[in-house]
Amino acid sequence: MKGYRLLLLAAFALAACQQTGKQTAQQESEHTAKADIPAFATDSAYTLVEKQLAFGPRVPGTPAQEKCAAWLINSLRPLADTVYVQRATVTAPKKKQLPCINIIATFNPAAKRRILLLAHWDTRALADKDAFNKTAPMDGADDGASGVAVLLETARQLHAKKPAYGIDILLTDVEDYGESEVEHSYCLGTQYWAKNPHVPGYKADYGILLDMVGGKNAAFYMESFSKQYAQAQTKLFWDVANKAGYSDYFRYEDNGTGAEDDHYYVNTLANIPTLDIIATQPNGNFMPHHHTSLDNLAIIDRRTMQAVGQSLLHLLYTDPFNY
Ligand SMILES: [Zn+2]
């Protein structure tokens, strides 16, 4: 996706001064034991990242795309009530026609109240921000695979203990084939889905996008389009995450981050208020490994996935409409 730095505030100095303490094992067990909130299985999520990487870069139009799609569909079918597979052809910059495979796993299809959870599963074709080799392929361990892994692991929990409301997990394709100078060239799978939903007239109360949720040294600041379109839901997620013990990760300071990410199109085309959980640096930039060959398995930190996955389960198994 495309990034904006809207404001460069004193947030950098503020954030840099804050301690990044680590949770103790005791705190960890205390907050996962609360109420009936399942414990997020971080090792399982980590394995799900490895499995995606084993297909090679999931670049649209390559054999890895079909192979990974089949694996995602087969993984979700036993867990969800219904799995929809949306195949389309989308037009990338330079009029490149690309196959697009969006996958939607639905839980409690008849429920009126619904939450949409989404992540992109494709990999950017080239590590064009790499310092040394801008045409190197990238693994997309954080950019793509981490969010998908957290959602697949969440699907397993939803299957084991179904909430009373509806949930739709949308794995979108062709998010990362864009060029920053070409308007609306990112998030092509989501743009297609927003204009052609898997169920005619599809609506959800709100949506949560996970993008780059597994990297080392991650912090999650409230992203500007999230605040613009889904302020109350964004605040709810941050409050839940902070109460769950993840204040080192979910920060209230404003670092001016804006990301023209999948949620932007869910907000503007599908009119579903949607927030983006996306790691950024205190200065508002994306993480240093973004779109470089460093975005590989070595960048993945289980603790980051734990913070995001457990916070999400806290939200889903407490009161997700309390905003
Ligand atoms: Zn990307």
Image: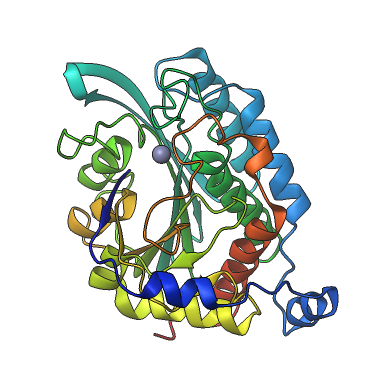
- Count of numbered labels shown in the rendering: 0
- Give the x, y percent position of residue 116: 41, 59
- Give the x, y percent position of residue 252: 44, 79
Say which of 191 and 199 sits in front. Answer: 191
Which residue is depicted at the point 35% across and 75% down?
10
Image check: 169 left or right of 196?
right
- Give the x, y percent position of residue 240: 54, 80
Residue 140, above or below 215: above
Which residue is depicted at the point 54% across and 54% down?
213
Is the C terminus in the top left, top right, bottom left or bottom right quadrant?
Answer: bottom left
Q: Is residue 273 visible?
A: no
Residue 302, above or below 87: below
| Quarter of the figure with residue 11 | bottom left
**Ligand 1 lies in which image quarter?**
top left
- Give the x, y percent position of residue 78: 65, 43
Residue 252, above or below 90: below
Which residue is depicted at the point 60% across and 52% down?
150
Q: Is residue 21 visible?
A: yes
Say which of 235 and 255 sits in front. Answer: 255
Say which of 184 and 290 sits in front. Answer: 290
- Residue placed furthest toward the top: 63
